[in-house]
Amino acid sequence: MSSNKFANENLMWEFNMKEEIDSSSNVLFMVLDALRYDVAQDLFLQGELPNFASYLPATGWEKRYSPASFTYPAHQAFFSGFLPTRVDQPVTPRRFAADFKGSVSTTAETFCFEETDIVTALNNRGYSSYCIGGVGFFNKQTALSRILPDLFRESVWSSVLGVTNPKSTKHQFEKAVDWIQATEQPFFLYINVSAIHQPNCTYINEEKDTLESHKAALKYVDSQLPTLMNAIEEETSTCCFFCSDHGTAYGEDGHWGHRNGHKTVMEVPYVDFLLKGN
């Protein structure tokens, strides 16, 4: 159980993913698109993320390495089971994984599947699946931006959920709650949180994105988190994954944005846990 006195008493960081899926537990996968590890951890340590803190260990966010430097390849890896890897050990045991011969990162507790991705695997097991899009790779306006959302039984995107709407997280989490409450089957819910991705300068009423506006965007997301998690806690059991797909550089060593290999891009915050509902 939790070692953080502020954490939810129904939360467990040690869990067997294979057993949970065999028991038809739900899955919540939330990607905080473009969030840097150092920003997430600094705000946690400063007490500026009170709602996220309820789901983090006493040490805060775990620093991990992303498998890619931008959204599309990172998500292709994520959905096949290649989540961000730990910085302090050669092999990171995987919670779920597409089967392939010779894998050294699957264990007896890994949920393994024959399909190419966990979304299709859970669809085939009778799960409901829902993608709440955010950044452009989920907007379904081009062939490329339909690839990821089309994995799901249902998906949604509109401009109010996208990067230009300063209240995008509020709308995304409200969509999630409505869907959860209408769903009777076990579910796989994916949310691509768009608020932290550029442009985020609106969160400090400036005209240019900065590290400070990046921080302000994350604090905004934190303020909205109870809307989603209160609904999740009403469910019986949910395997939860919170992470970033990549970070964002703001001029460090001459690097800007992402799709580059700078540590501000490749180091991402991560936590997973099992939440036993009411």
Image (tube, helix red, strand yellow):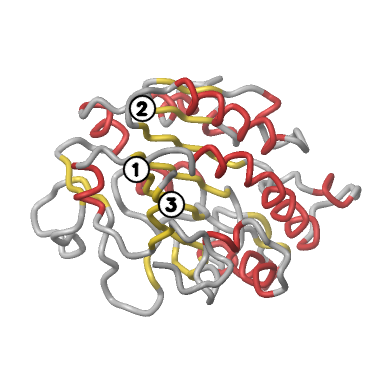
**Upstream in sequence: badge 2 or badge 3:** 2
CA–CA distance in space, label 2 to label 1: 10 Å
| Residue at x-position 47% and y-position 61% | 9
Look at the picture and state if 197 lies above or below 246: above
The mark closer to the camera, 1 or 3, is 3
CA–CA distance in space, label 1 to label 3: 12 Å
Q: x%, y% of residue 64?
A: 45, 67
When asked about the image quadrant of residue 5, the answer is: bottom right
**Upstream in sequence: badge 2 or badge 1:** 1
Q: Amino acid at mark 3?
A: Phe
Crowding at dot 1, Cα within 10 Å, few <14 / some 14-19 / many 20+, comes out as: many
The mark closer to the camera, 2 or 3, is 3
**Along the viewing direction, whichever of 248 and 48 lies nearer the viewer:** 48
Q: For the N terminus, which image quadrant?
A: bottom left
Look at the picture and state if 115 lies above or below 241: above
Secondary structure at badge 3 equals strand
Crowding at dot 2, Cα within 10 Å, few <14 / some 14-19 / many 20+, comes out as: some
Looking at the image, do the residues carrying marks 2 and 1 touch, with CB atoms under 8 Å apart?
yes
Residue 241's tag is: 3
Residue named by callout 1: 79
**Along the viewing direction, whichever of 22 and 144 lies nearer the viewer:** 22
Q: For the C terminus, which image quadrant?
A: top left
Residue named by callout 2: 151
Q: x%, y% of residue 246?
A: 53, 55
Q: x%, y% of residue 95?
A: 28, 55
